[in-house]
Image: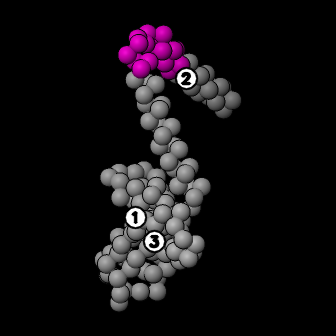
Amino acid sequence: MANILENQLAGLTQVIEKQLDEQLERFDNLDKDDLKSIREQRIRDEGIKYKKQEWIKNQNGFSIRRAAKWLTSYKIFDCDILIITDSQAAINSLTGVYTTFSLIQQCRASLNEMAKHTNVTLKWLSAYGSDRVNNTAD
């Protein structure tokens, strides 16, 4: 049994070393256009990561999703629903074309479920408005 495990481990090590060698060779053969493309992709990835961090930090997705789930669970369908947020990031994320971020997907699903039963509107309100208006939104 020990020999079998040892042989499997040795085989796995060879496969990993081969993959690493191939990747290193690809990196050695990159030209300026390849490096530029990699740099641009990293900038895009960092932008997406930043947006996700902002979304979580501000907890806008949690609040909107919680409101939508609460309204759905209590079957508040006999009137139009207006959800107010002071986060343009939340509105933009929810109305964007595509996302892989699960919180945004869950929030969209909750809002779509509500929209099957009643009119739902998301509205942005400036965070720099009057205290009374902002407290109402919060």
Q: Residues within 10 Å of mark 3 (few under 14, many from 20)?
A: some
Q: Residue at x 58, y 72 (%)?
A: 131
- Does residue 22 lie above or below 69 as drawn? above
Name the residue beneath numbered marker 2: 16
Q: What secondary structure predominates along the stretch shown in magenta? A: helix
Q: CA distance from mark 3 to mark 2?
A: 52 Å
Which marked residue is nearer to the observer: mark 3 or mark 2? Answer: 3
- Residue drawn at (49%, 79%) of the image: 70
> Magenta residues, as a range?
18-36
Question: The disc labelled 1 sits on which kind of residue?
Answer: Arg
Q: Looking at the image, tell me whether mark 3 or mark 2 is earlier in sequence order.
A: 2
The quadrant of the rendering that contains the N terminus is top right
Residue on which the image places disc 3:
84
Q: CA distance from mark 1 to mark 2?
A: 41 Å
Q: Quadrant of residue 36?
A: top left
Image depth: mark 3 or mark 1 in front: 3
Numbered badge on residue 49:
none
Where is residue 123? Give x, y as percent. Answer: 40, 68
In the rendered image, the vertical position of residue 59 relative to residue 121, given as above or below:
above
Q: Name which residue type carries label 3.
A: Ile
Nearer to us in this view, 79 or 22: 79
Residue 10 x, y percent position in the rendering: 61, 22
Dot 1: within a 10 Å radius of its alpha carbon, few (fewer than 14), some, or many (20 or more) residues? some
Which residue in the protein does label 1 denote? 108
Q: Can residue 30 be seen here?
A: yes
Q: How many marks?
A: 3
Q: Identity of the amino acid at label 2? A: Ile
Residue 63 lies, in percent from the top left, at 53, 68
Asked if the stretch drawn in magenta spans residue 57, the answer is no
Determine the residue positioned at 41% across, 60% down: 91
